[in-house]
Amino acid sequence: MSVLIITYIHDGIVMASDSRATASPRTPDDKSTIFISDAYSSILLTPSQLGIAFAGENGIDGVPIEIFLRPFVTKHCSNVKAAPEEVANQLLKFLPKLRPSQLVRFFVAGYRNGTEQQIWYVDPVESAIGRVDANGRPGVHYSGECDVVERIASSVGVLDTDGRLLRTLPFFPVAAGAFALQDAVDFSVFLVRAQIDAVRFQQRPKTVGGPIDVLAIQPDKTCWVQRKQVHA
């Protein structure tokens, strides 16, 4: 599994993700998690300056998704004028039909004609695409292993041992509309780090972790804010 955060504001789009890859044992009765790597990448930058990201499971038919997507990026994303919607449709055609148990969703983010911000999700299980930012307002989208992030982003409460609500906790929404690009970067990294650190200390499978990759997309430029490197 992995966690992906997409923060979209007036000034740009930020995509942030962890680097952990895990797998489930082949025996159905074994509920443990097998650690594979802390060097996987869940965000790719296309030659057309679009961000393609995925969250959830790390492989398709035994092939790491990052490697699985490279031919698509090379063959279908060289057109610098390709809009995010066009690339999302091409990606849906490229991906195989997945089983409902294969929990992975893809995202394409960037600008149409260099001005219109667009973020599309691609769901290979339902064979569908859709807008993440359909309401036109700044916001934050999270996907994958993100239960800790959901607690931060949602109004929550305290339950008794029978599951009855005892009291709600104070909730303070985030004003993403007032973010500068640096704020969007900081907030995205904070959410990924919160998920990683909570999973680290909780008694649960260690499904997220490793370095955090961050991609920032603006109408006139796209850059890696931070990205892990291969090293000895």
Image (cartoon, grey):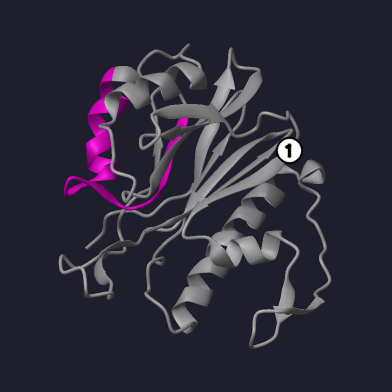
| Closer to us: 122 or 177 | 122
Q: Is residue 229 left or right of residue 119?
A: left
Taking the magenta stretch, the answer to whether it contains residue 65 is yes
Q: Measuring 58% from the left and 67% from the top, which residue is drawn there?
A: 148
Q: Quadrant of residue 180?
A: top right
Question: Which quadrant: the N terminus?
Answer: bottom left
The part of the chain drawn in magenta is 50-75
- Residue 66: x and y in percent read 29, 43
**Quick check: can you spot residue 190?**
no
- Residue 25: x and y in percent read 19, 68
- Residue 69: x and y in percent read 28, 35
In the displayed structure, 205 sits above or below 173; it is: below
Q: Measuring 51% from the left and 74% from the top, which residue is drawn there?
A: 197
> SS class of the residue under badge 1?
loop
Q: Is residue 143 left or right of residue 227?
A: right
**Count of marks placed on residues:** 1
Taking the magenta stretch, the answer to whether it contains residue 116 is no
- Residue 35: x and y in percent read 26, 70
Q: Quadrant of residue 54?
A: top left
Question: Which quadrant: the C terminus?
Answer: bottom left
Q: Is residue 187 left or right of residue 231?
A: right
Q: Measuring 65% from the left and 32% from the top, which residue is drawn there?
A: 133
Q: Measuring 24% from the left and 65% from the top, which residue is drawn there?
A: 24
Which residue is disc 1 drawn over?
Answer: 138
**Quick check: can you spot residue 224?**
yes
| Closer to us: 124 or 91 | 124
Going by the numbered disc 1, the residue's amino acid type is: Pro
Residue sticking out furthest to the bottom = 161
